[in-house]
Amino acid sequence: MYEGRAPRVPSHLGSAGRDVWRNVWSAGMGAYSPDTDRNVITRYCELHDRRVSLLAEVENEGLTQLGSTGQIVAHPLLRYVESTEKELRAIETVIGFTPEARMRLGIVAAEARKVAAGPEDF
C-alpha cells in the first residue's frame, strides 16, 4: 500500500481532469501507486477532460443538427461522448470506482491485511 502524498497534477490536464486527479488519489487512500498506476489515472483524467469538452460543444450547437439530406440527426459528437463514457466505465471498473469493483478490491485488500497481520492481531 502506498502511503505517500498524491503525485503532482499533470500540467496538461484541464479543470475537470485536475479535479478528477485529486479525487481519485484522495479516494484511493493509498491503494494506488504513482509508479504503477499513474498512467491509467492520467488517462482517466484526460477522458474526463475530453467528455467535458465534447459536451460543451454539443451544448453550444444543440443536440440535433441537419443531416446531409436535410433530416434532423443527433449531433455527431454524441458518438464520441458515448465512446468516451464507455472508456471511462472500463477504467472505473479497473480502479475500483464501481460498487462491484470496490467489493472485489475490498476483499482483496482484506485478504492482504490478513496475510500482513500476525496471529496476535486476531
Image (cartoon, helix red, strand yellow):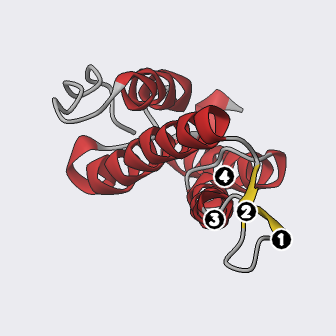
Label 1 sits on what residue type?
Gln
Label 4 sits on what residue type?
Leu
Name which of mark 3 and mark 4 comes first in the sequence: 3
Image mark for residue 105:
4
In contact (CB < 8 Å): disc 2 and disc 1: yes
The Cα–Cα distance between marks 3 and 1, rounded to whole angstroms, is 13 Å
Residue 47, above or below 119: below
Which residue is at a point 16% across and 29% down the rendered structure image?
11
Give the residue at mark 2: 66
Give the quadrant of the C terminus.
top right
Q: Tell me the mark number nearer the camera, choosing from 3 and 2.
A: 2
Measuring from the top left, give residue 106's x and y in whole percent. Answer: 70, 45
In contact (CB < 8 Å): disc 3 and disc 4: no
Residue 103, above or below 55: below
Say left or right for 111 vs 56.
right
Q: Secondary structure at mark 4?
A: helix
The Cα–Cα distance between marks 3 and 2, rounded to whole angstroms, is 10 Å
The Cα–Cα distance between marks 4 and 2, rounded to whole angstroms, is 47 Å
Label 2 sits on what residue type?
Leu
Which residue is at a point 45% across and 47% down the rendered structure image?
50
Give the residue at mark 3: 76
Label 3 sits on what residue type?
Pro
Towards the viewer: 69 or 49:
69
Q: Secondary structure at mark 3?
A: loop
Q: Tell me the mark number nearer the camera, choosing from 1 and 4.
A: 1
